[in-house]
Structure formats: structure tokens, C-alpha cells
Amino acid sequence: MYQFNREEYEARMKWYQEARFGMFIHWGLYSIPARGEWVRSTEEIPEEEYLPFMKEFDARDYNPKQWAKEAKEAGMKYVVLTAKHHDGFCLFDSKYTDYKATNTPAGRDLISEYVEALREEGLKVGIYFTLLDWHHPDYPQYGDRIHPMRNHPECSNENRDFSRYTEYLYNQVEEICTNYGKIDIIWFDFSYDDMRGEKWGATRLIDMVRRLQPGVIIDNRLEVSGEGRGSLYECDPKPYHGDFVSPEQIIPPEGICDKNGDPMVWEACFTMNNNWGYCANDHYYKPASMLIKKLVECVSKGGNMILNVGPDAKGKFPKESSDILAEIGRWMKYNHDSIYGCVPANDIPKPDYGRVTRKGNKYYVHIYENTLGPLPLIGFDKNKIVKVRSLADGHEVPLSTAWVHSDYPDIAFVDLGPDPVLPDSVDYVLEVEMEE
Ligand code: H79
């Protein structure tokens, strides 16, 4: 029987907390209509209009090696792919349903290729698996807040047996945990209303998952939705407690601490545009420069960031997404020391011009603004600074000796040189090494 154990918990969370940056991938039947992953619900599409998408699902451009390569080059350390989203369609060859990629022109299990490709690139393997199922006959339909058939009294819930559904859920999760080798992350989505915890059979489910996949990291949505923190926050972990808090489309303003005030593990998940699943008309992409700053913000507050890509119907990343990933990668290539393994610099206040992350005695000062005059390193004991260098190219940056110092005797300043325009206006990182 699984029970929370602090030491085991900290051991299994180590790689994940050091990784800091991952990729989410939402891909499924909904990628064909290309109006986001909720399309069946938001447009209340009946099954007979949605099922025919199966005939079009051919995965013609599906190339998980390319996905893995782009994730790795962006500096991401793990990837989480939707084995099943709320529509119930499975990318994997489940023996408990016909509603799966195997029965489409794609004609095969798409999860095994994905797992293999990630392993080849040295990336950790994550599987997203939703607790909802808009296809299963025993999942409540009429009157459910979000089911596509919620407004159809003829879809009465009378003959539905939810225990048959939880059995199906259990069996499919067992397949995921058995058929693909080691899985590093299982990302369940999501509890709502009275659908939470034991309603999903959570204790039995997690017992099985932890038995088959010792060391797997599980999010907290068997307990909560994107809102809410779960029983680890309450310092009273349930047997199905989440390993990390999963704020959606928001960076927690002050990071996340549990009830006792101890920092928690968390991961903010974000879309690049405004949809998780492919949405052909959604061109509102956040610029790479902004996403880099958001990643830094997460790390400076003690969290991870997982950034989403929604491949198109054929399995290809949208060009906008690939371009953004490449740009993030160009920054990460030179500045990743300020991300991996970093933690909040709790003893240094957030500067006007950026943020600070820390690894051991090295502090990473992220500068978002061009400077005018010497740059103050507020909060650093100037007598304990060993060396300041530009992280990207390694050159030493001298402590400033400008006359202005007499007015601010306790503040260390650095001179970035005669050119006030920073070499990289995205996020220029100084590494400040302090005496141990
Ligand atoms: O998989 C992604 C989302 O589809 C999923 N979680 C991430 C990782 C998610 N499911 N539910 N929610 C997020 C929150 C629910 C949002 C809703 Fe709505 C607001 C459901 C109905 C109103 C947004 C607007 C989605 C549909 C309409």
C-alpha cells in the first residue's frame, strides 16, 4: 500500500526540480477540426459528427524524433504528451476500446514511438491522461457541467454505471504503466465538482501506478483542478496526493508554500498561443522573449514551466511554435546555467530591471532592460563578491568604480561598458559568484 514518505518523495522529485523546463504536447482527433481541444464540448458536437474524424487521422507527418529534437534544442528536459484527452480518443493501442489511433489510417500505437524517440534524445517521458471521458457510455452526460451532451435529456444518466467507468480508467492507466517501459511523469487532468479523489477510485489507482512505476512523478489533479493545491499543501498527504501543484496559465505571484510555510514543488503550464490543441485561426503567439522571461520568473519563484505545442492534424508542429522553440533554444544554449538546478535567490530582493536565480554560491542576475550608468546589484554584500561575468560569453564584468559610489557606499555596481545597449536585449544574464 503506497504511503507518503518525505525522503522517498524528495529523492524522486530531484531530477524534476533541477530540470525546470518541459514541453507539453496536445494532439488528438480535435487537431483535425483545428478549433482547440475542447471543441467537442464548446460546440456541443454529437458523437456521430465527431467520430468521422477518425477516418482522417493518418498521422502523415508524425515524427516524434523531430518533436524530441525540437524540445531538446529548446533546452527542455522532459515532454508530456496527451495519450488521451477529454474526448476519450486514445493515441495508444488500448485493448479496452476501439476508439484509438490503431483503428484510424495511422494504424498503430503512437505512444510507443513517442517514448522511444524521447529516450533516444535523453529526455524524460511524460504521459498526460485525462480522468474525463466524453466517449465512454458510463461517463455522466446529461447535466454534467461540461459534457458535450449536457443539454440532451435523451442522454439520461439512468443506465450509466460509474463503477464500470472507473474500472476502464484503472485498466487503461495500467496499460500505460505496463506497456511502455519506464514512465517518468503521469499528468492526470482534472477533478471538478464532486468528481474528485475517491470518486475516481484514486487510492486504488495510485497504488497500482506506484507499484508498476516506482519513482514516477504524478501531478495533483486527482485531488483538484488547475486551481487548488491538494493534500500535500495541507501537510496531510492522501494516498493519492499529487507530487506537484499544477497552476494553469498563471505563475503563482509569490511561488507556492505549504500550510507550514515550506516551499512546494510546482509547475506552471502555459500555451504559446491561446489553445492547447491545434487551432488554425489562433495566431496570438507570445513572443519567445516573453516566454523566456516567464521561465525565469518561474525558476526565481521555485517552480518549473511546461510550455505547450499543439501539432496540426497531421502531427506537424505549427511553424510559429517551432520558431519560438528555436529562439528559446538560442538563449538557453548560452544561459542554461541560470535555469537548470536553480532556486529562488531568497536573500536578494527582485531588482527593478529583472530577476535573480541562484545555484549554490552563484547568483544569476537576469537583466531585462538596457542600463544607463552603472548597474546596482542590490542585496549583494560587495565585500563577498568573487567575480562577475557575462554568462553568455564568459567575459568578466568589472565592479564599477564610478564616483557615484560615494553616495551609495553599501551597494555594489557593475559597469557593463560604454555601450548601454545590452548585447542581448532578451535577457542578459550576469553570473555573480559569491564567497562560499
Ligand atoms: O489539457 C489542457 C486543457 O484542455 C485542460 N488542462 C490543460 C492542461 C483543461 N481542462 N479543463 N480546464 C483545463 C479548465 C476548464 C476550463 C473551462 Fe472552458 C472553462 C471549461 C469550460 C469553461 C475553456 C473555455 C475551455 C472550454 C471553454
Image (spheres, helix red, strand yellow):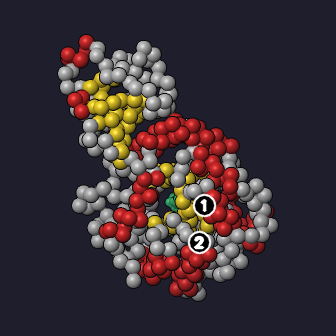
Give above or below for 370 relative to 86: above
Sequence-earlier tag: 2 or 1:
1
Query: Quick one: label 2, few (<14), some, or many (20+) residues within 10 Å?
Result: some
Spot occupied by residue 417 in the image (x, y as percentages of width and height): 41, 17
Is the CB–ligand 1 distance for label 2 below 8 Å?
no
Give above or below for 276 relative to 337: below
Quarter holding residue 129? bottom right
Give above or below for 131 relative to 416: below
Name the amino acid, label 2: Gly
Q: Which mark is residue 119?
A: 1
Q: Which residue is at a point 35% across and 43% down the rendered structure image? A: 358
Spot occupied by residue 361 in the image (x, y as percentages of width and height): 31, 41
Q: Which residue is at a point 64% across and 40% down the rendered structure image? A: 323
Label 2 – label 1 distance at C-alpha: 10 Å
Q: Is residue 73 left or right of residue 299?
A: right
Query: Quick one: label 1, few (<14), some, or many (20+) residues within 10 Å?
Result: some
**Residue labelled with disc 2:** 181
